[in-house]
Amino acid sequence: MKQKVLILTVALCLASAAEAQLDIWVNGQIAPPDCEIWLNHGDTATLEVRGDSQTPEPVEGFIFIEGPAAIDGHALQYKGNASEYWDLEELAVAMGKTPQETLAAFSDSTGRDLSDLSRFVLADNRIPAKPLEGPLIGGIQFRCEAAGDVLLTLQSDDPVPVYPDYTITIHQTAFCYTYYVDANTGSDGNTGLTPDEAFATIQKAIDSAYDGDSVIVYPGRYEERINFSGKNITVASTDPSDSSVVASTSIDFDDSQYPAVVFRGTEDSNCVLAGFNINGYVRGNDGSLEPPIAAHTRATISRCVFQENSGDCGTVLKFCDGLIINCLFADNNYMYCAGLYPVIDGCHGLIKNCTIANSRDGLGIRVLDGTATIENCILYNDGITLGAGAVVNVSYTRWEPPVRVQGSPLQLNLGPGNIEADPCFANPIRGDYHLKSRTGRWDPDRGSWVLDAVTSLCVDAGNPVSPLEDEAVSVFNRRINIGAYGGTAEASKTPLRWSLLADLTNDGIVDAQDFAYQTKNGYPAGMAISGDLNKNGAVDMEDIAVLLDGWLKTTVWR
C-alpha cells in the first residue's frame, strides 16, 4: 500500500526564566524536544501542556494550527481566578467576527496560513506569582484531517523575550480506511470497519472518515440527508456498474427545502459519489453555513439515477462543477412551484455520458455565468438554457435546438457529432432508458440481453477519442455509445457496419466535412479533439491515414 507521511511540528515559544520550560505531553507520555511520534491516518492525539514548576504565571498565548488539522476540546486544569481558554468559535464571538474572518485576521497579523487556533491565559493575579506546575491545559484533541505538513505552535503573547522552540514531530502514515453501511443490519454503535460491524447510516460513516477513505453502502433505503463536509472521500454502493444494485440503493430525502446530498463546496475530484438512486436533490455548496460558501464542489458524481423526483422545484442537481458521468435524469417533476426550473442548474464542469429526458418543463440543463461542456449525452424533451456569461460546448450529443437564452453575453460552441434522431429508448414509460439494438440490449427486469427490431442511432455515436471503458468487446464496436449507459457493461451492442471510426460528424459517411473537423485548428477549452483517432493526444499523419482509409465509406443506415 502506498503510504504518505504527514509531519506535525509543535513549537513552544514561552516567556519565563531561562531554565524554565513548559512540557508537551502526547497521549499521556512526555514528548521531549525533537522526538518523533507515529500515528495512522485518521487517528487523534491527546495533547497536554504541563509546567515544570519554574515557569511563573501569568502566561498568555495562542495555539496556532497551520495545515490540514484542527483541535477540539480542552480541560483548563490550572484554575487560577484569571485563567481562560477560548476556542476559535468563542474567540470569534468575542471579536465580533465569524470564525473564517477571525482566522483571516490572525493569518494577516502573524503571516501564518492558519486552519485553526485557540487562545489561553494562565493567571491567578496573586502576589507573589505562583509557579506553573503539573497539568495546565489537558484534553486537547489534535485531529489530522489530510496528508500534508502541519505546524502547531504554542506561542506566548507576552511582550518579553522568548526562549528556544520546543519541537516534536508526528509522522502520520496515510492509511486509508473503508467503512461499511447497511440500513438493514447495521448500527451506528458499531465500528463500521467490517461488513459485520457496519454502520446503519451513511452520515455516520462520512463523519468517521478522513480524506482518502471509502464508504461502501449496501442495498437498502436510506432516509437521511448526507453532508460531505468538505471531505475528499468516496461514497459508493456495492456495485455502481450494476443498474439493479443502483436501483436498490436509495437515498430518500425528497424535500424541496433541503437537499438529500450536500457538499461543502471545497471538495475536489478525489471526492466521489457513485452508484445511488437519489430521491431528492444534490447541492454542490452548503447554504446553511454562515457565511455561506459560494464555491461549487468539484466532486465527481458517477452512475447515479435521479428519476421521478420533485427536487428543488424540479431541479435535482445544482452547483456541481466536477465531472458528472453516466447519470440518468428522467421524468423529474414537481408541484406547487411557480416558474420554470431546469433539471441541472449552475453546474460548470464536464457533463459526460448522461441521459436527461422527459422533465416537466423540458429545461434539461441551465448554465449560468460559467463554462460547461456537454459530451456523449442524450437530451430528450429537454433543452439547454444559457444565462448571462455562460459558455457551453456541445459535441457528440443527441439534443434538441434551439437553446433558451436568459441574458447576454453568452457563447454556444457546437462541436462535431451532434444529432437530433429519435434515441429509441427501450421503454421510457416504465423508466427504462437503455437504447434499443438489433444485436443486443440489456433488460434490467429480466437480467439478460434481448433483441430489438431496430437500433438506436445513439449506439456507437460517441466521440471517437472516448475510450470504450466497460462496453462489450466486438469487432463492430468502434466507438462509445452516447447516453447514461455508454461506456458501461450495459451499453447496447453494435450491429455490423453501424458506425465508422472516422465519421466525425455522425452523418454516416467519411468525407470532406470529417476531414475539415480533423484538421481544424483550435477547439474550445474542455472540448476533446475528436480527430485524434489513434488517441495519442494530437492529430498527426497516422490519424489522417485512418480517415483516408475510410474515405467515402458509409454506414448501413445512411
Image: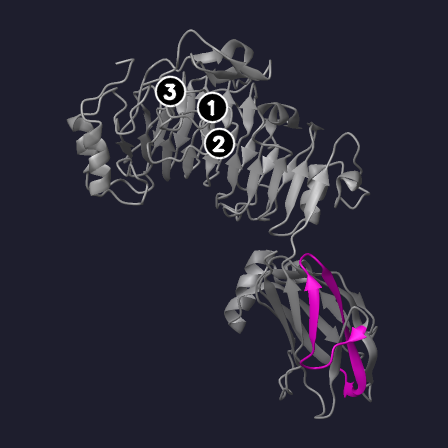
Q: Mark 1, mark 3: which one is toward the viewer?
A: 1
Q: Which residue range is magenta in the image?
A: 29-57
Of residues 249 and 407, the one nearer the viewer is 249
Q: Confirm whether residue 292 shows in the render.
A: yes
Of residues 440 and 70, the one nearer the viewer is 440
In the image: residue 138, left or right of residue 285: right
Of residues 332 and 535, the one nearer the viewer is 535
Q: How crowded is mark 1: few (under 14 residues within 10 Å), some or many (20 or more)?
A: many
* Residue at 55% from the left image edge and 33% from the top image edge: 282
Amino acid type, callout 2: Asp
Q: Mark 2 points at which residue?
A: 470
Looking at the rendered structure, the secondary structure element under dot 1 is loop
Quarter the N terminus occupies: bottom right
Determine if the magenta segment contains residue 98. no
Quarter the C terminus occupies: top left
Q: Position of residue 414 (x, y in %)?
A: 27, 30
Q: In this view, does 29 lie above or below 233?
A: below
Q: Mark 1 points at which residue?
A: 491
Amino acid type, callout 3: Cys
The answer to which image quadrant residue 495 occupies is top left
Amino acid type, callout 1: Ala
Q: Earlier in the sequence, mark 2 or mark 1?
A: 2
Q: Which residue lies furthest to the bottom in this view?
A: 18
Query: Does the CB distance between marks 1 and 3 fall below 8 Å?
Result: no
Determine if the magenta segment contains residue 31. yes
Image coloring type: one colour
Q: Where is residue 534 in the image (x, y as percent from the top left)?
A: 30, 39
